[in-house]
Image (cartoon, helix red, strand yellow):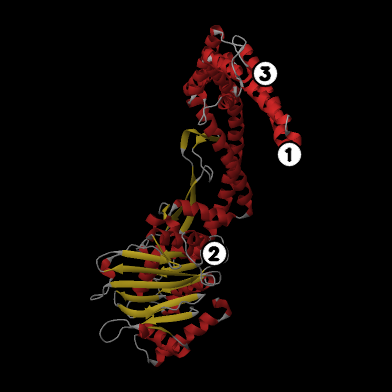
Amino acid sequence: MRIRDLGVIDDAVVELAPGFTAVTGETGAGKTMVVTSLGLLLGGRADPGLVRGGAARAVVEGRIELPAGSPAAARALEAGAELDDGALLISRTVSAEGRSRAFVGGRAVPVGVLAELGEDLIAVHGQTDQQRLLRPSRQRGALDRYAGESLTGPLERYREVYRDLREVSATLEELTTRARERAQEADLLRFGLDEVAAAEPVAGEDTELAAEAERLGHADALSSAATLAHAALAGDPAEPDSLDAGTLLAQARRALDGVRAHDERLAPLADRLNEVGYLLADVAGDLAGYADDLDADPVRLAAVEERRSVLAHLLRKYGGPENTLAEVLAWAEAGAARLAELDGDDERIDELAAREGELRGELARLAAEVSAAREAAAGRFAEAVSAELAELAMPHARVTFRISRTDDPAGLEVDGRTVAYGSHGVDEVEVLLAPHPGASPRPIAKGASGGELSRVMLAVEVVFAGADPVPTYLFDEVDAGVGGKAAVEIGRRLAKLAQSAQVVVVTHLPQVAAFADRHLVVEKTNDGTVTRSGVKVLNDEERVRELSRMLAGLEDSELGRAHAEELLAAARAPRGR
């Protein structure tokens, strides 16, 4: 992680170890800025007051190795980010005017995306931080994972039945609440289907009727034209002396027949005249037949127009974009199917109501099974955390779970009560703490002081390690108000937690820092700033000097160095891990 122009930090690089990293330094040296930087990087509030005096903006950049199958990787890819060999590059800038920008994997994103990533990447524990596990929903989820197989199976079956019940209930509610609308829709469909059935339209009928109406409406003109055309081709019996096309064609054919023998070029022309004669005779005959068959019946014309009016009415009401009878018939087919569905809704409502009752009964049975598994896991959890607290200078503290239910008349009947339910079951889960004998158990956020709270959360995280798989834990002043043997035990538990996750601890206690896999020290320059070289990874000799300073206030005190070496040796011993 690189930090620039944040608080007292000018420009510094923080290299965190995969296991346990301790961050130490003189009071006011800027250790808290490491915590603040991680908070900014993962969606924390942007305070312009954090920008170093004289700088335009503060910048925090980080490279985060993501575990295989990490939900954070999926969320980052969804936001358009690109991964760098399985690592995610994150950047956050805060201007002196208070503007904030965030980048994930090279893509600008809303700051809220960083906060979503942070939920799955890091658990921050400090006296002023909003704790992840302080939220009851997280406590319930963590307890469920802690419970393991005894709860996983029943909870998965519960969620399957819950999804089925939601679907059935939604359909049932829609059917029952829309009864009036469905009745109105059914009446309209019946009326329309009756209209179509009464008319009995045939696809293409409207086109045929339009052509017939056009013919009947101009019957006289058509008959006159056919008669005149026939007379022009075949002659008018009323005027025997009039010339017609047939007579003239016969004259032309006879003229060629008399001389075709003298020039072979005339033979084809004469043959073509013969063909024209046959064709002319055919056309003349067809015209005579057309004139004889033409119906000028006004009664039929009126019937056709009436039928066309009926079909036009159907087209206006039930036709589609092409305005055809085929579309009217398609509407009638779909309408009949929809009417059958609407008419069957009453029967369907009865079936759905019965199915809903079956599902609610099955869900109640599974909810009771889930609750029983949670109760059993909560007892094991409380016992384990209380044992951890006894080693963290809180020997009389007791942790318990409050697993409760809320009455709801519309809920599930479980164990004789009708209670609210959701996708998680019927339980409301909260971790309670009684810090000393005689104290009433209270939610951990209210039942512990600032220093106690960090130790409680450390104990919880140690017990939950592996069950609530967050890859990184950050503890700020987890050792507040603790010393001596309790401080050693805090360091030992942090080292234990670091076996399954990355742990970063800002501490004042050498007993805690001695257990770290990597030790960082934050140092100010003479002008009061922290520069690039101001965050150092200590080697073995430098660790002895720093621990001596923390123990005795003197880096080169022989007694302090001896004590520091003893601390390191104890931490590295097999029982220390």
Q: Is residue 577 left or right of residue 451?
A: right
Name the N-terminal-most of marks 3 and 2: 3
The type of residue carrying mark 3 is Gly
Q: State the SS at label 2.
A: loop
Q: Residues within 10 Å of mark 3 (few under 14, many from 20)?
A: some
Residue 261: in sight, yes or no? Answer: yes
Question: Where does the image place residue 536, in percent across and percent down from the top left?
Answer: 40, 84
Residue linked to disc 1: 263
Q: Residues within 10 Å of mark 1 (few under 14, many from 20)?
A: few
Marks 3 and 2, how far apart at CA: 105 Å
Q: Is residue 398 left or right of residue 521?
A: right
Front of the two marks 2 and 1? 1
Mark drawn on residue 465: 2
Marks 2 and 1, how far apart at CA: 119 Å
Residue linked to disc 3: 285
For the residue pair 211 and 416, the one nearer the viewer reads as 211
Residue 368: in sight, yes or no? Answer: no
The type of residue carrying mark 2 is Ala
Name the N-terminal-most of marks 2 and 1: 1
The type of residue carrying mark 1 is Asp
Q: State the SS at label 1.
A: loop
Residue 270, located in which quarter of the rendered image? Answer: top right
Question: Where does the image place residue 365, in percent across and percent down from the top left?
Answer: 61, 38
